[in-house]
Image: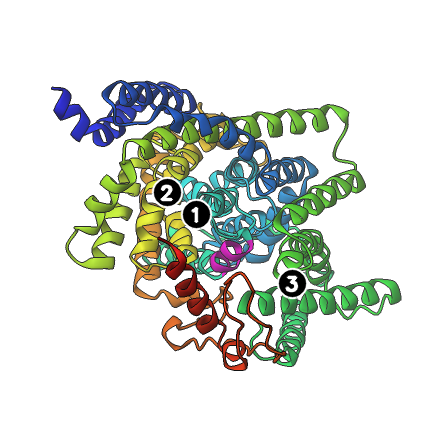
Amino acid sequence: MTAFLVANLAPIMFGSLIVFLLFGYPVAFSLAACGLFFGFVGIELGTINPAFLQSLPLRMFGIMQNDTLLAIPFFTFMGLILERSGMAEDLLDTIGQLFGPIRGGLAYAVILVGAMLAATTGVVAASVISMGLISLPIMLRYGYDRRVASGVIAASGTLAQIIPPSLVLIILADQLGKSVGDLYAGAFVPGFVLTGLYVGYILLVSLIKPTFVPALPAEARTIREDDGTSGLRSLGILTVLSVIAAVAFAKTRPEGTPLDEKIVVSMCVGVGVAFFAAVLNKATKLGLLSRMAERVTFVLIPPLGLIFLVLGTIFLGIATPTEGGAMGAMGALVMAIARRRIDFKLLRQAMDSTMKLSCFVLFILVGATVFSLAFQGADGPVWVEHLLTGLPGGQLGFLIVVNILVFLLAFFLDFFELAFIIVPLVGPVAEKMGIDLVWFGVLLAVNMQTSFMHPPFGFALFYLRSVAPVDDYTDKVTKKPIKKVTIEQIYWGSVPFVLIQIIMVGLIIAFPGIVSTNTTKGPTIDADKVLMQMEKAPKADPAPAGADGSAPATTDSDKEDPMKGLLESIKSDQGKKP
C-alpha cells in the first residue's frame, strides 16, 4: 500500500481535490486543505522534503506584492459604478430605437451593447444584470421568444470575459507568466469575431423563425423627426464620414503598427469626427443632423471615451493594465457624478462588492498556491507532462484533450477556479510542446467562457434568473398579461450560444492567426548562428619571471591569447606539486 501511494501520490491528490469540490466545499479551502494534507503525507512517505514547504510564506508574500492583481479591484469597481450610472440603460434604449424597425433589432441592440459594456466593465455580473433588468421586459412586451431573449442576454453578458479589459485575462496572464497587455491584444479581435457570430445567429433566427424576433411596432419608436421620418439617412451619412476619417487615419500609421492599436486609435478618430459634427450642428442649429443621429452620437461618446481611456492607453503603451484600470475606475466615477446617478450609499455598495470579489479571488489564489506547491513536491507536473505529451496527435491532440477537459469541468467550476487549478498544470506542458502561451491563454479564455453558460450551474444563467419575472404579470405600457420566464427556457436559450462558443474555439485552433497576428513578438535568435568574439588584450611589456620560481612571464603572444597564458600558468603550478 505504501509503495502504491508513493508511486501515485500526484494522481491521488488531484482526484481527491475533485471529490472535495463535488461535495460542495469552498474552492479556496478545498485547495489549501488538499495541499497541506498531502504535503504532510508526502513528508511521512519520504517523497517530499520537509524543507520544500518552507517556501510557502515567501509565495504568500509574492501574491500580496503582485502589482498585476491590482487591476482586478479597479476593473470590478469600474463595472459596478457604470452599472449604477445609467450608461447601460441609455445605450440599450438608443440602440434599441436605432435597430427597432428591423426583425431582431432588440437582440442586435443587446449584443452590441453587451460588447460595448464588456469593453468598459470587464464584469459579467454587471452586464447580465443590467441588460436583464432593462431589455428583457421590453423583449417580452413585444413578443420575443423567451428562449431567444434569455439566451442572447446571458451570452452578450459573457462577452465581458473575452473582450478586454477582462478579469479572466488578468488571471490567465498571471498564471501563464505573460504580460496582461499581450493577452489583451491577442483577445481583441477574437472577442469581436465572437460578437459577429452572435449577430449571425440572430440573423439566422430572424430568417427561419421571424415570429421569434419581431420588429418594434411604430408606436414604440419614440425617436422621430417632425415630419415623421426616422432620421436614419443623416445618421448613415455621418457614419460614412466617420469611417472614411478612421480609415484615412489608419493608413497614416507607420508600417508594423499592431492591428489592435490601429483599430482602437482609428475608432477614436472616427468618433471624434462624429462628435465634432454633432456639437457643431447643435451649437449652430443648422439642422444638418437628425435627432437620431445626434442622440446616437452623444450616447456613444461616454462609453467609447472610457474604452479609449482604458484600452487605448494600454495598447498605445502609455499605461500598464493596472494604471489603465485605475484611470477607468476614476473615469467611471466622474461619469456617474456628472450624470447625478450616484450617492454615498451606492458608492459604498460598489466598494463592498469590489472588496468581496477581490478577497474571493485572492483566497482562491492562496489556496491554489498551497495546492500547487505540494503538487510540485509530489512530482505532479511530471505526471501531467507524461500524461499529456503521450497523447496521439501531438499539439493538436493535446489541444483537443485540454479543451474537452476544460469544457467538462466548466459544468461544475467557474472560470476563476479553472484558471487557478487547470492552467498551472497544462501551461508548462503547452510551453514545452512549442505552443505560444499568449495564443493558448486566449484559447482557454474562450473555452472558459462556457462556464458562465453551462446548464445547470452557469453563473450568467443565475444572474439572469435573479432579475427575470418569476410570476405572470401585467405589462405597465401595453396593459397586456405577460407570462413568466421559467428556468427551463433560460437553459434552452443558452444552448445555441454554448455551441457558438465551441465553434469559436475550433476557429482559433484552425486559424491561429486570429490571435497571434495581434501580439507583438520580439526578434527570434538562432543560437546555432551566434558568433562570439573575444577582444584581444592590449599589448604590454613582458614582466620578468619571479625569482622564487613563480609562473614565467607572459609573452606578447600570451597577451594576444589569454586562454593560452592561463593554461601555461596552470601547467607551471602543477609541475611544482610533489
Per the image, is 182 magenta?
Answer: yes
Report the side of 489 relative to 311 (left or right): left
As shown in the figure, which amino acid type bears the numbered disc 3? Leu
Spatial separation of the CA atoms under disc 1 and disc 3? 23 Å
Element at label 3? loop
- Identify which residue, 244 or 478, lies in the foreground: 244
Spatial separation of the CA atoms under disc 3 and disc 2? 29 Å
Residue 316, label in figure: 3
Where does the N terminus fall, quadrant-wise?
top left
Horizontal and vertical percent position of residue 310: 65, 52
Per the image, the residue denoted by label 2 is 423
Q: Earlier in the sequence, mark 1 or mark 2?
A: 1
What is the basis of the colouring in this image?
rainbow
Q: Are marks 1 and 3 in contact (CB under 8 Å)?
A: no
User: Magenta region: which residues?
Assistant: 181-188
Element at label 1? helix
Horizontal and vertical percent position of residue 501: 35, 50
- Identify which residue, 277 or 307, lies in the foreground: 307
Q: Are marks 1 and 2 in contact (CB under 8 Å)?
A: yes
Per the image, is 170 magenta?
Answer: no
- Identify which residue, 533 or 383, lies in the foreground: 533
Residue at 35%, 53% in the rendered image: 578
Packing grade of label 3 (10 A; few <14, some 14-19, many >=20) is some
Packing grade of label 2 (10 A; few <14, some 14-19, many >=20) is many
As shown in the figure, which amino acid type bears the numbered disc 2? Val
Q: Earlier in the sequence, mark 1 or mark 3?
A: 1
Per the image, the residue denoted by label 1 is 176
Element at label 2? helix
Regarding residue 483, the answer to whether it shows in the image is no
**Image quarter for residue 27?**
top left
Please tell me whether mark 1 or mark 3 is closer to you in this view. Answer: 1
Q: Is residue 250 above or below residue 482?
A: below
